[in-house]
Amino acid sequence: MKHTIATVLFSLVVLSAWSCTPKVPPRFTLSEHTEVRTEGDTTLQPLARYFADHFGGRTSDENTWDVIRLVRDTTLGGEAFRVEVTPRGCTVRGGDYGGVFNGVQTFFELLPAEIYARQCPATPLRDTLLQSRPRFPYRSMMLDVARTWCTVDQLLRQIDLLAYHRINRLHLHLTDDEGWRIEIKSHPELTAIGGFRGGDSPVAPVYGRWHEKYGGFYTQDEMRRVIRYAATRNIEIIPEIDLPGHSRTIASIHPEIRCNYRPDTLSTRGYDFRSAWCVAREENYTLLEEILSEICALFPAPYVHIGGDEVDMEQWLRCPDCRSLMQREGMASPAELEDHFLNRAIDILNRHHKRAAVWNEAVATARLSRETLVFGWKDTEACLKAAADGYPTVIMPGKYFYLDMRQTPHEAGHDWAGVVDARRLYSFDFAREGFSEEQLRNVVGFEGAFWSEAYLSHNPEKNDYLDYMCFPRLTALAHMGWHGTERRWEEFYRELTRTHYDRLAAMGVTFRLFPPKITYRNGMLSASTDDGSQPFYIERGSTEEHPYTAPIATAYPAHYRFISRYKTGHSPLTVHEEYYRHIYPEVTVTSSMGESTRFPYANAAQYRGITRTRRTARPGDWICYTFAHNVSAEEILVQTGNPQLPKSLFIEGVVETSEDGHTYRKAGTLDHGILFLHQPRNLKSIRITATSDLRDGTPFITIEPLKIRPVERPMK
Ligand code: TNX
């Protein structure tokens, strides 16, 4: 995986421009008469077809004069290319298949954006010579299909989009606590049962839909089709079987793989949440061999990702068998048990001629072989350490590369790693993050990760949310993977707005635009954009969008929401900051479910964070907020749990309010765990009462701070 640093920054080098002779030279014209030839190199045939399909051209020898030749030229490096356009014909040379493919993508960039919609008009091309090579060999996206399953067609569509960006890896997170998505022929139960959760499945519906059984999986035949489709597009599928933690699905189907003790499941209504494989149980390695041998045979990639992240080692410390294994082997910490387990898995992979890829925790002790590919997700420090320890390292710290993070503070998405928009992602800089030359030599590239526990709340049947979360963040990642991290954002932003947005639109991607800028001065509310998009406004109480053409005279800036649109792209709904002004009146929180010691009531009462109860909810259980002094407000958001991550909330419940703390009046029922109280007046207390069982078996309820907007006064 080593590559020299001399793979320097390159930009696309225009070696010679078109000629400057006075008479207009004849130009090469791409049209349906153009023929793509591979000159007998049959391995390039699928690529020729892919290329020609984009403009309705031919791939057979028909003696036309408009010919594009695809040529493998080993004097160029891996994935490097050279594209030449002359009036007599074009040549796309590549150091290998990937190089020719990258050259084809560069050829697309010479054409109108319609090429991505396969509707390219006949196009005359200037004489051109372009050549380039990637800065990093590993330009990747991770898709978590375990939490939210995607259909085969959705995978193929995603592969197409990645390929247009010269992203060359798709890492599929195939198993997790909430699902098992890949057929294992020797263990059909893994998908037959583990492919679905909720309803009567033994796999608890911790995320997403809890009333219905949800899911799906890929048969090996389907996966072979995906692999082939990806390979034509220079994308290698990296499969991940997450071990030895994140394994609750397989542990629910095969409880015998867990540690040798009975857990206390009193507070979880009998559901066993333990997610780790027992390290000491010898039969576990037989099951592992049966699974991994099929994975090795199915996926042609040299690496199989075996996880290694976020293992709950408490389970091992409570297990008499694991403890005696530690003693026998003189292990000082349970982290060495993880080494032991992963080394056994790596032995299996090696026997099947594969190497292991792991998350950064797995090399915390730095005892795995240096052939192991490390994915540094936790933070930059984890990446620096892995690289310093001599591991080939994929850079993906969450606070830059997690595509499930929200892109402004009020948008959908997680925020545990921060707020990450394309600009933030693009700001990752090796020099500033402290990489030495030696560490940089071990960096193989970047990966953007779309974790999907919240995706199920965003209509995954349509691709809109995935598109919105991926683009243009992956456009930025692809750029860094190809060019390195030295370019200024302003330069890339210009490229984004002038070319990429049109290309994304032609691809049919619902991409994200940056929010319009909202200002309020002298009673006038204005919106502006700098990317050519059109802002619209939506008045309070309405859903209708009106084109914004001039500043709006109003004393209530918080009554307007804005969105900007350009072709298929749109910004988030954006409001003036006044909309987010909250008040924090003194309140106490109580509940019938007891208080967790780690997440006490004070967290919610002091508007600091969430509270957890000591146990899960039964019908009749309640949460009560009591104000020190009666409160009036514009709006109060009452919320249990996080509606995007439907776990640990009241599935169904009523909300009541009281002016004296004794007599209550019903204010409404929860919808996905939340209720807005509009213009409540003179409240002493708010009580939420569960009206149904918590069917997902989570061990606790989360109590959120109230979000209270002050009674409105005109601002001008
Ligand atoms: C951490 S990243 C996880 C995932 C979650 C993700 C949510 C990693 C190796 N583990 O299980 O889906 O955070 O952002």
Image (spheres, grey):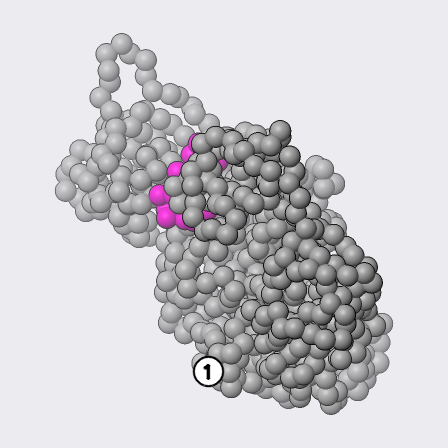
Relative image position of residue 240 (x, y in whole percent): 55, 66
Relative image position of residue 333 (x, y in whole percent): 82, 71
The residue most toward the top is: 22
- Residue at 67% x, 87% y is 269
- Name the residue tied to disc 1: 192
Question: Any magenta on residue 496?
Answer: yes
- Residue at 75% x, 79% y is 593
Secondary structure at numbered mark 1? helix
In-front residue for pair 706/194: 706
Question: Any magenta on residue 32?
Answer: no
User: Which residues make up the magenta segment?
Assistant: 495-512
Relative image position of residue 43 (x, y in whole percent): 33, 52
Looking at the image, residue 544 lies above or below residue 701: above
- Residue at 30% x, 49% y is 50
Left or right: 329 with respect to 279? right
Q: Quadrant of residue 681?
A: bottom right
